[in-house]
Image (cartoon, helix red, strand yellow):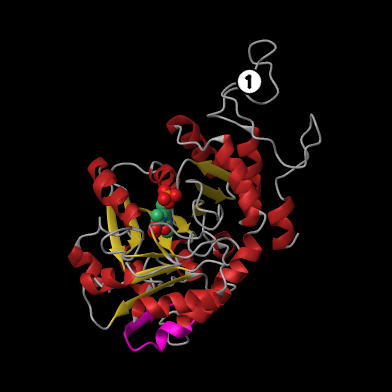
C-alpha cells in the first residue's frame, strides 16, 4: 500500500458492532468480563483500548513498523525508552535537540546514574569515538530542533551494528511522510504526535514504533506499568488528523520552500537554517534520506539580540507566537527564551542557537499572505 492510501485505511476497520466507518471513541475505563479472565481481549483501558489500538496500528503502518505504542505526550514516549536502561549505562545524543529532551536526560536521568554525551552527530567520527561497552542507546533527532541540522541515520546505525546498542530516532520534525528511520537501520522511531501527526494543534501525544518483538513487548510493558497513556478522544482526533497527513505535508514543504527563499534574500536576516538549500552543510544527507525538506525553518538576525527578535515576534499578524509546531496554522517562536530555555546559554551558543534566532513552523495557509506578514514584521 502506498503512503496516501495507508494514512486513510491502515489500522482502521469498520466497527464490528455497527459498521461505523470511523473508529468510535471507546470512552470507557474498563470492560465487563463474563467470568474472571474470560473477556473480549480488553480488561482495563490503561492496558488496551480499541480507539488507541486503531491509532497504534495506523502509526506502525506509516513507519513501516510491526508495532506502534502510544503515550500521553512525546516526552512520555522518550521516557519509556530511557527506562529500558539501567544505572551505569551511557547514551550518545546530539548536541542540538529539543530542550525538553535535554532536560529529561540531564535533570532527571543523570540522577538515576545514566550518563549522556551530547555531540555533533553529523560527524559519525565523533559518535564512533564515544562508543564504549557501556553505550546502550544512540539518540538521534533529525532534522534537529531548532537548528535544522541533519544526521545521517544509516551511517550512525551502521556504527552500532553487531553491538548491544539501540538506535532511537526522534522523527517529529520530518513526520513519516518525509522520513522512515526504521528503513534506514534504526530500532525505534519516536514522534511527538502533538505535531504533524495530529496536525491541528489540539492534542498532546507521543508514539513509538519498532519491528523487534522483544523490544515492542518491553515498551508496551512500560506503557502499561508507568501508565502514561493517551485518552480515546485524543486517539480519535489523531486518527482523523492522520488522514490528511500527506496532503498537509506537501503544502507545508511547498510553503516553507517559498518562505526560506524569501528570508535568505532579506537584508535584516543573517542566516537561514533550512535543509533544502544546497549550501546547507548536510543537504546531501537530507536529499538521501528525506522525501522533501519539511515545514520548519529557523533564522538569525543581523542585529543579534533578544530585543530585536522580540520586536519582530510581537509584530506578526498571521503567524502566532507560540510553542509547538506541525499544525495547519503558521507559528513563530523564540527558542532561546521558549522551547530551549532549559538549555544553558553557553551550550546554546556552542551550537549557534543565538539570542536572535527565530523559528517558524510554516502552516498550510496561502503562502503570499505568509510572506507579506513576514515582510511587514521584519520591516
Ligand atoms: O510536547 P511533547 O508532545 O511531549 O513532545 C516533546 C518533543 C519531542 N521531540 C521534539 C523534536 C519536539 O519538538 C517536542 C516538542 N517540541 C515543542 C513543544 C516545540 O515547540 O519545539
Q: In the rendered view, tell whether residue 48 sits above or below residue 36.
A: below
Q: Report if residue 353 is visible in the image.
A: no
Point out residue 314 in the picture as x, y percentages from the top left corner: 32, 67
Q: What are the residue bounds of the magenta stretch?
A: 261-276
Label 1 beta carbon less than 8 Å to ligand 1: no
Image quarter where ligand 1 lies: bottom left
Q: In what element is the residue under mark 1?
A: loop
Quadrant of the drawing holding the N terminus: bottom right
Q: Residues within 10 Å of mark 1 (few under 14, many from 20)?
A: some
Q: Quadrant of residue 91?
A: bottom left
Q: Residue visible at 70% across and 12% down?
A: 34
Q: Residue visible at 22% across and 65% down?
A: 347
Q: Quadrant of residue 367?
A: bottom right
Q: Report if residue 24 is visible in the image.
A: yes
**As drawn, is 186 to the left or to the right of 126?**
right
**As drawn, is 91 to the left or to the right of 287?**
left
Identity of the residue furthest to the left in this view: 346
Task: Give the residue pinned by disc 1.
Answer: 31
Instruction: Find out whether residue 263 is within the magenta segment.
Output: yes
**As drawn, is 121 to the left or to the right of 231?**
left
Q: In the rendered view, tell whether residue 371 sits above or below residue 131.
A: below
Point out residue 181 in the picture as x, y percentages from the top left corner: 54, 62
Viewer-proximal residue among 227 and 181: 227
Instruction: Find out whether residue 141 is within the magenta segment.
Output: no
Point out residue 173 in the picture as x, y percentages from the top left corner: 48, 63
Quadrant of the drawing holding the C terminus: bottom left
Q: Quadrant of residue 341?
A: bottom left
Viewer-proximal residue among 218 and 360: 360
Q: In the rendered view, tell whether residue 209 sits above or below residue 153.
A: above
Identity of the residue furthest to the right in this view: 19
Point out residue 228 in the picture as x, y percentages from the top left corner: 45, 36
Amino acid at each position: 500500500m502506498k503512503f496516501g492510501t495507508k494514512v486513510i485505511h491502515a489500522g482502521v476497520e469498520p466497527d464490528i458492532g455497527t459498521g461505523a466507518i470511523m473508529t468510535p471513541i471507546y470512552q470507557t475505563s474498563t470492560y465487563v468480563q463474563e467470568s474472571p479472565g474470560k473477556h473480549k481481549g480488553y480488561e482495563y483501558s490503561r492496558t488496551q483500548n480499541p480507539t488507541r489500538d486503531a491509532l497504534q496500528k495506523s502509526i506502525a503502518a506509516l513507519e513501516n513498523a510491526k508495532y506502534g505504542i502510544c503515550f500521553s505526550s512525546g516526552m512520555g514516549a522518550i521516557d519509556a525508552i530511557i527506562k529500558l536502561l539501567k544505572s551505569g549505562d551511557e547514551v550518545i545524543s546530539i548536541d542540538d535537540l529539543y530542550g525538553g529532551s535535554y532536560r529529561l536526560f540531564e535533570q532527571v536521568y543523570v540522577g538515576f546514574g545514566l550518563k549522556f554525551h551530547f555531540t555533533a552527530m553529523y560527524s559519525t567520527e565523533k559518535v564512533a569515538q564515544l562508543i564504549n561497552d557501556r553505550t546502550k542507546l544512540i539518540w538521534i533527532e533529525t532534522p534537529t530542533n531548532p537548528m535544522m541540522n541533519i544526521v545521517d541515520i544509516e551511517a550512525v546505525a551502521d556504527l552500532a551494528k553487531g553491538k548491544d546498542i539501540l538506535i532511537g530516532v526522534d522523527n517529529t520534525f520530518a513526520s513519516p511522510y518525509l522520513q522512515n528511520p526504521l528503513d534506514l537501520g534504526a530500532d525505534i522511531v519516536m514522534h511527538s504526535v502533538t505535531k504533524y501527526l495530529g496536525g491541528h494543534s489540539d492534542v498532546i501525544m507521543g508514539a513509538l514504533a519498532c519491528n523487534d518483538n522483544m523490544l515492542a513487548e518491553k515498551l508496551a510493558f512500560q506503557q502499561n506499568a508507568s501508565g502514561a497513556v493517551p485518552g480515546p478522544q485524543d486517539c480519535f482526533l489523531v486518527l482523523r488528523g492522520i488522514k490528511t497527513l500527506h496532503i498537509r505535508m506537501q503544502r507545508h514543504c511547498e510553503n516553507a520552500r517559498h518562505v526560506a527563499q524569501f528570508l535568505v534574500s532579506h537584508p535584516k536576516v543573517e542566516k537561514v537554517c533550512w535543509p533544502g538549500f544546497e549550501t546547507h552543510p548536510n543537504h546531501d544527507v537530507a536529499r538521501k534520506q528525506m522525501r522533501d525538506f519539511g515545514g520548519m525553518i529557523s533564522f538569525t538576525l543581523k542585529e543579534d539580540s533578544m530585543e530585536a527578535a522580540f520586536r519582530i515576534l510581537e509584530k506578526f499578524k498571521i503567524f502566532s507566537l507560540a510553542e509547538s509546531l506541525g499544525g495547519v496554522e503558521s507559528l513563530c517562536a523564540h527558542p532561546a527564551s521558549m522551547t530551549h530555555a532549559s538549555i544553558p546559554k553557553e551550550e546554546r551558543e556552542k551550537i549557534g542557537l543565538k539570542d536572535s534566532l527565530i523559528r517558524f513552523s510554516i502552516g498550510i495557509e496561502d503562502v503570499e499572505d505568509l510572506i507579506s506578514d513576514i515582510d511587514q514584521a521584519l520591516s
